[in-house]
Amino acid sequence: PEHREVACSMGDLANVYCDQGRFPNALELYQQAHAIHAKAFGPDHVDTAGDLASLGLVHAVQGNHKEALPLLKDAYDIMGKSLEPGHPNLVQVKQFLDKTAEVVAA
């Protein structure tokens, strides 16, 4: 099942897992969704970047900030190519990126 809609459903379920604190399960589903989106849309698509941002956020929530930082940076860079500077998704990823970078630098 490597269809884009399956990837969206995986992301939705991963969001539920995050809300439940089931981070390993969420990471697995976000990784699978990312692989599907990357294959379907390519590595520089907003949906692919959204998966990277989700992966980065889960790592950050678990305290794995050094692992989260490059994922969030890649997500921000990709989104920045397609979204307007004030787009809510881009702004949110930038906030997560900045906060994560502060933690890593400390």
Image: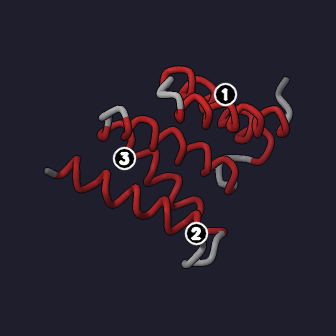
Secondary structure of the residue carrying numbered label 2? helix
Secondary structure of the residue carrying numbered label 1? helix
| Mark 1 residue crowding within 10 angstroms, few (<14) / some (14–19) / many (20+) | some
Count how many numbered circles sit on residues in the image.
Answer: 3
Question: Which one is earlier in the sequence, the residue at label 1 or at label 3?
Answer: 1
Residue 35 in which image quadrant: top right
Question: Which one is earlier in the sequence, the residue at label 2 or at label 3?
Answer: 3
Q: CA distance from mark 1 to mark 3?
A: 20 Å
Question: Which residue occupies 43% across, 54% down?
Answer: 73
| Mark 3 residue crowding within 10 angstroms, few (<14) / some (14–19) / many (20+) | many
Residue 8 numbered mark, or none: none
Question: Which one is earlier in the sequence, the residue at label 1 or at label 2?
Answer: 1
Amino acid type at circle 2 is: Pro
Residue 66 in which image quadrant: top left
Q: CA distance from mark 2 to mark 3?
A: 20 Å
Residue 88 numbered mark, or none: 2
Secondary structure of the residue carrying numbered label 3? helix
Q: Residue at label 3?
A: 69
Residue 85 in which image quadrant: bottom right
Q: Among all residues in the image, which is located at the extreme front?
A: 20
**81 above or below 38?**
below
Please indicate whether residue 103 sits to the left or right of residue 1 in the image: left
Amino acid type at circle 1 is: Gln
Question: Which residue occupies 40% across, 56% down?
Answer: 96
Q: Quadrant of the N terminus?
A: top right
Q: CA distance from mark 1 to mark 2?
A: 25 Å
How far across and how far down the image is residue 67, in percent? 36, 36
